[in-house]
Image (cartoon, helix red, strand yellow):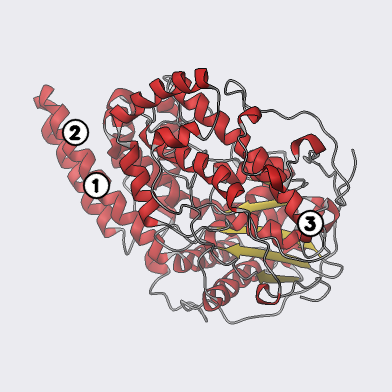
Amino acid sequence: MDGLPTVSPATQRQLIEIPPGLRRQFYYPVVLLDVLGKADDSIRPGLRLHSEPPLQNSYDIERIFRGFVDKLALICQNEPNGDAVTAATVLQAPDKVLYVFASNNRTKGEHAKLRNSVKRVLELLHQKAPIAKSADDETESAILSLILLLNRARIKSYLRKLGNELDGCIRSLSTTAQEDKAAESASITRYTSAIKLVLRCVDTIHSDNNIVADIRERLVNEERLHRSGCWYEFCHIAARLSAYKEAVTTFYLARDTWPVLFEDFEIIFIDPTKKEPSPLMGKAKTAQQLLRSLTSDEEQLERYKTQLDSFQRVENLDDNLQGIWEKASKLTVHAEIQLHHWLENTGGTLPHRFFNMYPYIGSSKPTCKLCAYYFDEHQTDVKVRDSHGNIYSTWAYPPVYEGDGEFEGKKGKDIRRTDIHRMKKRIVADIFRLLTERVGNRRVHDSTDRWQESVRFRTVSEADILSDYLDNLTDILEDMSISEAPGAETNNLTEDGWESGNSAAATPSASQSFSSATDVSAADTPTEAEVDTDESQYVQNGALPGLDGRKPDQRGLAKP
């Protein structure tokens, strides 16, 4: 890591703990919003009412770059359970490009395997485009095989789920088809064949266009789609499988746009941040107790208590809160914030540090609600993916240590306190809005922001969106061959990655930078003595605080 500032190991630095009062004030509303979102009976699997055009049809080169970074992170999230979320960024050193990754719940050995695999993907992309298209196809196939091997356990999990969901679709069809006895036999036969075919795809994926066309016909009936979760799950899993082929397409698009990305480079995986103990101590709070901690306005409390009771009729919130308290899960700093925290402490986050002046942190999944709020309220130029809207009560603020740096010592404490108070205001506003409007924005899945969105009112255009995804799935099932990856004897390909190779030299390019920073005013920065006081003044009538056009402060950020 030549030329990179170093950070002292955490074991050699003194951690500045979050004051207990501030922890309670932040996590009580977080936990309440979490259980309310899960209980909200307005939450239904839904679809986006619009779809972004494919990257290859985009004239926005910055969007192409962001897609490239996101896909790099995606291929590193290879665990079936989805816990190992990965974040990535691309920096420009004087003599090379730096790919920096952060990944939750990983060992150093796992980081080494991922580094070898990512290195080999980038090296294959560095090869000169051959004159013969067949040779280029062979390289593309080798890249896809490497990605499939790296993600074999996750892909097998997807395929097993796909078979199970299609089995559920068959049962759904057999029930509804009783109204049309003439069509029932042929329909069930076709879908039984589809199930068997998909289960065989654990080793080899093939496709039958007629089967996919039949599925598309079934999905046109949107009412049936909403009544039967298996169709929704089918589309979700299909999109996840499609993502690997899309990743290869995006990599080639990036290679054609920025060849220097694949010449001289270095890959860095940063050490994960230590988990923190649960802030939920003592006897579990009830939903009404948590609600009372949000405001001292008795009139508001009476109104929201009535609305909270309606949630209790849907699901026992107090039982859910009891379970969260008893579980006492440790807190995790999410990968995007780990990476951002590392950047702040190793040279900063100004645009000139990033490749092509694109200050962007990509991730294998869209950001959660709390990460999105953190990047909104924290003073930074760095952009991240749009949020899927889900909230996790095990989210952790990055650690603050004693020291003289911009994000250490008293400065770091003040920044943390301001960030947490601003985030809390937005969380409380979300709670009041949810209680008032009974509209949540939680998703059943958090792994894609392309085709699903929790909405209450839907339009007939969803069938067209589903049709697009099924068309894409058809292409993937025709092109992908898992049998070429898991058992293939391809050069030096192993489950531990590839043998390391050499890379060659890059020169930076420049483009217009952008800034999203907002300032921290003194009025928004409570003192340590205030952290245990009632904070109802921060939220009036459930209003969501908005951006106020404030200028960046003096933390090294460029002024507009």
- Residue 322 left/right relative to 458: left
Of the numbered discs 3 and 1, the one sitting upstream in the chain is: 1
Mark 3 lies on a secondary structure that is helix
Mark 3 burial class by Cα count in 10 Å: few <14, some 14-19, many 20+: some
In the drawing, what numbered circle is on residue 173? 2
The answer to whether one can see residue 497 in this image is yes
Residue 193: x and y, percent? Answer: 20, 47
Name the residue type under label 2: Leu
Residue where numbered disc 3 is placed: 410
Residue at coordinates 15% horizontally, 41% vertically from top-left?
189
Query: Are discs 1 and 2 less than 8 Å apart at CB?
Result: no
Viewer-proximal residue among 455 and 176: 455
- Per the model, the C-alpha gap separating discs 1 and 2 is 13 Å
Which residue is painted at 54% across and 33% down in the image?
A: 294
Q: Which residue is mark 1?
A: 194
Q: Residues within 10 Å of mark 1 (few under 14, many from 20)?
A: many
Q: Amino acid at mark 3?
A: Lys
Where does the image place residue 404, in percent across and percent down from the top left? 83, 64
Q: Is residue 319 above or below residue 102?
A: above
Do the numbered discs 3 and 2 sit on residues whose CB atoms are within 8 Å? Answer: no
Q: Give the secondary structure at mark 1.
A: helix
Image vertical order of residue 29 relative to residue 542, above or below = below
Amino acid type shown at disc 1: Ala
